[in-house]
Amino acid sequence: MDFYRTFVALPIAVGKEVEQILTILKQSLNNERISWVSPDRYHLTLRFLGDTPVKQVEAIANQLLQEIKSARIRLQLTTLDSFGPRKRPRVVWIGFQESQLLRKLFTDTQRALTSCGIPSSDQPFTPHLTVGRIRSLKDPDRFYQLLDELKYRDLGFVEMDRLIYYRSILGNNGPVYTSLCQVEFEG
């Protein structure tokens, strides 16, 4: 059976505030093994589906187009942090302010996928923007010191104007994302 690696997400373009902080991080951590995410791949994942049977892709796209209705979402970026154990963090991420509209969009996406036979995720919804994947750190203390210094700096706002059902093809230069369908938001 043929599969596509898929996920549902909101594409994001960040402002100069995030670009400045990432420049500081990249310069200060240039000796660490961190793969920084390219800004053209920035997104907020609503649901990672993983291997999805190709024969199911069109039904999922149609259900998302039918079920998802939303106004544009404007959110403040709130904090810079990491996921993973303190001795071996795995991801550098930026968080978002709480949003009922975003939670509703997550719930609507779950409902659309469930109606296609995809069970709801057991994972809690933690809206975040992944900006780096940590392979290894030579100096974790320096990494955490830097995060603490930058943690609550002004990160600006982002606007989300559409939901995209993506196919992800893994490659040596990072994943390549292609749109399987887009749902444009109102306003």
Image (cartoon, helix red, strand yellow):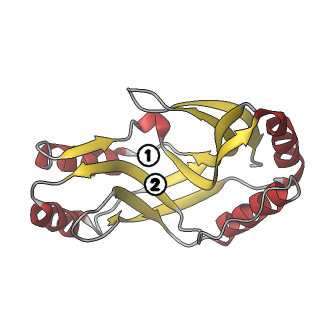
Tag 1: residue type?
A: Val
10 vs 186, nearest the viewer: 10
**Quadrant where the N terminus lies?**
top right
Tag 1 secondary structure: loop
Identify residue for label 1.
14
Mark 2 Cα shell of 10 Å, populated few (<14), some (14-19), many (≥20): many
Residue at (54% x, 61% y) in the render: 75
Do the numbered discs 2 and 1 sit on residues whose CB atoms are within 8 Å? Answer: yes
Q: Position of residue 129 (x, y in %)?
A: 46, 54
Q: Which mark is residue 121?
A: none
97 vs 167, nearest the viewer: 167
Q: How many marks?
A: 2
Identify residue for label 2.
129
Residue 164 seen in render: no
77 vs 32, nearest the viewer: 32
Q: Position of residue 70 (x, y in %)?
A: 77, 56
Residue at (82% x, 44% y) in the render: 60
Residue at (49% x, 32% y) in the render: 170
| Figure quadrant of residue 156 | bottom left
